[in-house]
Amino acid sequence: MTYVMHDLEVTAPLPTLAIPPTARGYALVLRRRGRVVGFMMEPATGGTVIEPAALAPIITAEVGAKLLQESIAEELDPSSSQPAAMPSLTIAICTKDRPARLQRCLSWLLRQVEPGREQGQTIEVLVVDNAPSDDQTRKLVEGLAGVRYVLERRPGLDFARNRALAEARGEWIAFLDDDVVVDRGWLAGLREAWAENPDAGAFTGLVLPYELATPSQIIFEQRGGFRRGFDKVRYGACFPANSLYPCASGIFGAGCNMAFRRDLMIALGGFDEALDTGAPLPGGGDLDAFFRVVRAGHVLVYEPQLLVYHEHRRELTALRRQYWSWGLGCMAFLAKCYRVDPPVRPIIFRFMAWWIKYQVKEGLRSLRRGGPPLSMVLAEIWGGIAGVAGEYSRSERRIERIRRAFP
């Protein structure tokens, strides 16, 4: 049971959508003059055909206001010139034993990197191979022109991210996960974000699904996926629109698509290696990095044109573990904040109260038709309990053992 995906330009004649017999719906990535303006999922009976006349009002209801906003912005500023090349850039992909996904990620990325270099942008692509079990990743990268390989023997994503920071030659460093592919406007979106916010210390971007081919992927995306909306957002030392700011750092974006001013991240001490440690604590490092950037008084910008497509977990067991890791990583991150940043403790208490209410609401919703699976809600709750119950301190001890084992 799948949702068939289409990429539609709304200023062109709308197509007729033929829903395959095995599909249960369709998903649309919506663009206006090449710029992403919306995403929608609609159920549909397999084997049906949706004519343009029926599709138009559905699209209008979803993105009509956004289209009007974009049109007005274009009238007020009709300039179509490309932003000037941003400072030198390192694009880092931290990977472990997934050469097929890495190859796909690099294939899509290099289609933009080479033209970017020809236009005068200084760009390097860096692959950090994290505690690999074989040499497949090294062989893959060595066969690609313009891609640099680095081995990080210490296991853990934030060890790999910090190795990328140390090895990078660019003034900015962008991190991509190996299970994403970049949109055709990804590099232009990064340039646009920098041109509009040269004072920023970090950027995050939109994440949409690469496919909706399994029930697990559909469930995840119906619950919101990694999406953070289609409007630009500029975050600073304060953000009055959110009373839980900055502890609710999930609002900033996702770690699979983020960029930082390299000297800033080094000055902040890099990524916390006791977070994102693999199986025991597979999360929290991105939340912590975003939090520390804004707590240090720097600007973080969410740019929807900085778009990637993420391959969501295909199996329900893997999805349950992901929700567990979200609860675990979030609460481990907050436990760290409580210890090292006392002024935010009242916000942490408010966030905890909100989180409990949210999980209760989701649990009740799961009992109704169309609600989320109860097992996913319970997985996130159980992960959160484990995170509160000392997981960050346990992880610190594990990390010290890894540092001694790999000096």
Image: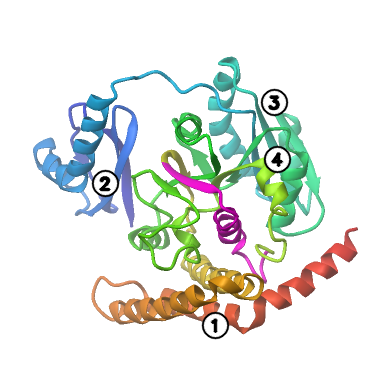
Q: The C terminus lies in which quarter of the figure?
A: bottom right
In space, the residues marked 3 and 2 are separated at their CA atoms by 40 Å
In space, the residues marked 3 and 1 are separated at their CA atoms by 45 Å
Per the rendering, the mark at residue 149 is none
The amino acid beneath tag 1 is Ile
Question: Of tags 2 and 4, which is closer to the observer?
Answer: 4
Q: Position of residue 254 (x, y in %)?
A: 51, 53
For marks 4 and 1, the one nearer the N-term is 4
Question: Is residue 284 part of the magenta span, yes or no?
Answer: yes
Depth check, front residue: 257 or 51: 257
Tag 3 residue:
146
Q: Residue at x 39, y 53 (%)?
A: 227
Depth check, front residue: 101 or 265: 265
Q: Residue at x 70, y 40 (%)?
A: 127
SS at mark 3 in the image: loop
Q: Residue at x 82, y 69 (%)?
A: 400
**Most extreme residue toward the left, as rendered?**
53
Question: Of tags 4 and 1, which is closer to the observer?
Answer: 1
Q: Is residue 143 visible?
A: yes
Tag 4 residue:
127
Tag 2 residue:
20
For marks 4 and 3, the one nearer the N-term is 4
Question: Of tags 2 and 1, which is closer to the observer?
Answer: 1
Tag 1 residue:
385
Q: In the image, which residues are magenta? A: 278-303
User: How many numbered callouts?
Assistant: 4
For marks 2 and 4, the one nearer the N-term is 2
